[in-house]
Amino acid sequence: MIKAPPAQFIGLSPIIFFVVIVLFTGILTNDITTMPILVAFFLGAAYALLLNRKDKALSFADKLNIFCQGAGNKNIILLVFIFLLAGAFYSITVDIGARDATVNLALGLIPRPMILPGLFLICCFISFAMGTSTGTITAMAPIGLGLAEPLGAAPALLAGIVVGGAMFGDNLSFVSDTTIAATRSQDVELKDKFKANVYITLPACFVTMLILLFIPVADVSNLQSSSYELLQILPYVLIIASALFGLNVILVLAIGIGSAAMIGLWEGSLTLVSTLQSIQTGISWMQNLAMIAVTIGGIVSLMQAYGGIAWLISVLTRRIKTRRGAEFSIAALVSVLDVSTANNTISIVTAGPIAKDLNRQYGVDPRRTASILDVFSCSFQGLVPYGGQILAIAALGGISPLSVSMYSWYPMLLFVFGLLAIALNIPKSLAGSKV
């Protein structure tokens, strides 16, 4: 058994290196989107391979093996297939007219001032029912991005709205993997963590809808009479329904692609050859994203092997003196872990045991801790431009991930209300005795 590495700051530096080169290139060119994200991660991976452990030197072959094990993690590979299938689904639904039909239906049914809040609320509902932000983005990205042109709004704004709604359910849903991870790590009931969470998520949701209500959009009255076939909307109905029934996301996407293909063949908008070409086109859109996911997995594995994650945990937990300080430290720990790993579930699993120890030492209610872990990990997951959620919708929309982050208002507000909940002991019923 390999001995755990000693904590060292240098082990955390690959993610800092990535951020620095992206910002430095943006400053030099006056365009923050200049540096291609995949190239930046490749440079980050190269830098990570140059580092080493403090206590013993790893050979280059050892480091490559660690990188490949992280890159080939089963969760990473599953994410890659989800991304590729999501691209295929997006492409084929556009080609059969499903996206335009759904957009025209939405423009006809939802009052113009409520278009943006309505889109956000629909995404919130779907993500809460499905418990997956990735699945919600897969279902709603074509619709949200399709609204950009008729509304005269920036595609990044619509993408940010979809991401925000997706993170609402990722954080609050009873079947979300983050909810399950947070409650299991603290040995609390799902319903108790939910009760603690609603004091944070509902105000953030309300303020987000209020902001969206005042975002001006173009007059779409002339588009409300646009013709559309209800049959074309069926793939979205099926993908949402199958997800709500709890089917695996791979099966959900397969149903969506298969139904869209059959509709295209039935209506004559696709031939067998053009169907296959459409699927290939969508897959090719997501190939960069798949490589980014694989590269991130390898870099994170190296950071753990170098003691970077251990260093982060030790720094963020060493100066705690009060219960409120413990809560802020838990929030900071899971937040920085999410920024470092770009995976909110992994950040919760990593921070969970440390947080449980802090509960015992400083009298923090474990139900409150479970809520803090989930809230702050999901907040940053909806903001980091190299997280799977933002990367996926940015790839589908052909826009910069950084621009999507700027419009991810709900995750920003979730972070703000999370801080207020800690500072003001909200909810009071879960406040501990030591302050």
Image (tube, grey):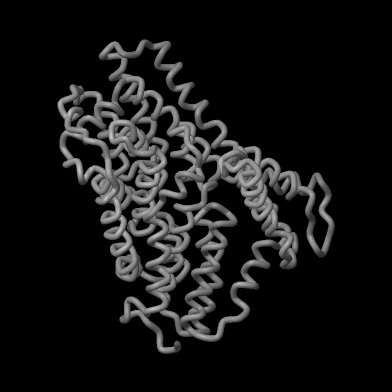
Instruction: Write down the quadrant of residue 410 in the picture.
Output: bottom left
90 w.r.t. 416: above or below: above
Counting from the top left corner in percent of width and height, residue 49 is at: 76, 48
Position of the C terminus by quadrant: bottom left
Residue 1 visible from this viewpoint: no
Location of the N terminus (image quadrant): bottom right
**Would you say 57 lies left or right of 271 here?**
right
Q: What residue is drawn where x is 22% and y is 35%?
A: 219
The residue located at (60%, 38%) in the rendering is 34
Residue drawn at x 39%, y 71% is 188
Name the residue nearer the viewer: 196 or 285. 285
Please give left or right for residue 224 compared with residue 25 in the image. Answer: left
Residue 378 picture location, percent across and down:
44, 57
Q: Relative to 433, say whether 402 is above or below.
A: above
Number of callouts: 0
Residue occupying the point 47% across, 83% down:
323
Name which quarter of the figure residue 170 lies in. Answer: bottom left
Between 54 and 42, the one lying in front of the other is: 42
* Residue 205 in view (yes/no): yes
194 lies above or below 282: below
| Residue 231 % position (x, y) | 21, 24
Q: Nearer the viewer, residue 306 or 408?
A: 408
- Residue 168 in the image, given as x and y percentages of width and height: 35, 55
